[in-house]
Image (cartoon, helix red, strand yellow):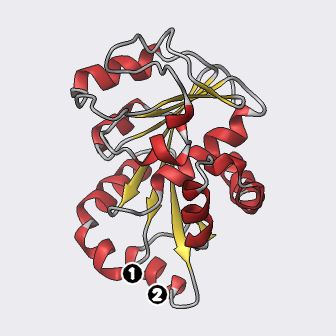
Amino acid sequence: MIGKERIFVTGIGKGAGASTIAILLADGLGKERRTTYMQLDDDLGPYYYLAMDRFKELKSLAKDSARTAVNMVDKLNCLVHLPGERTLEFQEKTKAILAASGEVIVYEDEDLRLGEMADTIIAVVDPLPSLVFQNMGKIRTLKKWAMDGARVIFLVNKVNKGVNLSKLLTGLRITSHIDMEYIDPKDVYSYQFQGKSLLENKAMVKDFEGVYKKILYYV
């Protein structure tokens, strides 16, 4: 990666795990380069995943400039939606993406239009067939972008013994992908009950290393 890199992470299906993937990816990149993680929709998941309720004061994209806003979680600058905040308008999101500081910007949202600003798009797929069928429009758009030359990575998340990966990929006609095994939910629950950030879960971070290296191969 040369210069500022923008990586857009979006979920294929509600609860696909896009936030977890985006946070772990940004954390890995943050150990090597100045990285900002931005969560642009109004989901409060990342606020709690990163245990940002421990902070006394937090910068916010709803009231602060993305150019100067800094909330450091270890080596990662995290700008997330905060409780009680208003939802950002599309134009505000695009301005924040362009203004954000750092060498790498990992930003997350469900609005596919924001992918047009990215150097790399990571589509996190929940392999549950009913969710895949409900989101075929989004998948078709991403596949078209890929055919037109965009760098699109399909990451199949939550892979477990019940998932027929070959059947899924054949049905979607996806030839290039990355898959990640299902994270034991007890780890997510346990760390939130303890008021800890997911990034303090060294086992989870280590489990992501293989996926992280595969993503770096593409970007």
Q: Nearer the viewer, residue 113 or 64?
A: 64
Separation of disc 1 and disc 2 at Cα?
A: 6 Å
Q: Which mark is residue 18?
A: none
Counting from the top left corner in percent of width and height, residue 84 is at 27, 32
Q: Nearer the viewer, residue 97 or 176?
A: 97
Horizontal side, residue 217 vs residue 123: left or right:
right
Q: Which mark is residue 171?
A: 1
> Which quadrant of the structure image shows residue 3?
top right
Q: Are marks 1 and 2 in contact (CB under 8 Å)?
A: yes
Horizontal side, residue 13 vs residue 5: left or right:
left
What residue is rendered at 60% in x and 21% in y? 4
Counting from the top left corner in percent of width and height, residue 39 is at 42, 36
Q: As displayed, is residue 105 above or below residue 198?
A: above
Q: As displayed, is residue 179 above or below residue 91?
A: below
Q: Is residue 150 visible?
A: no
Name the amino acid, label 2: Lys
What residue is rendered at 51% in x and 45% in y? 151
What residue is rendered at 47% in x and 77% in y? 169
How many numbered marks are there? 2
Tell me the SS state at disc 2. Answer: helix
Q: As displayed, is residue 181 above or below residue 35?
A: below
Name the amino acid, label 1: Gly
Counting from the top left corner in percent of width and height, residue 86 is at 23, 28
**Quadrant of the rendering where the C terminus is positioned:** top right
Counting from the top left corner in percent of width and height, residue 40 is at 36, 34
Look at mark 2 in the image and give the residue it sits on: 167
Mark 2: give few (<14), some (14-19) or many (20+) Cα within 10 Å. Answer: few
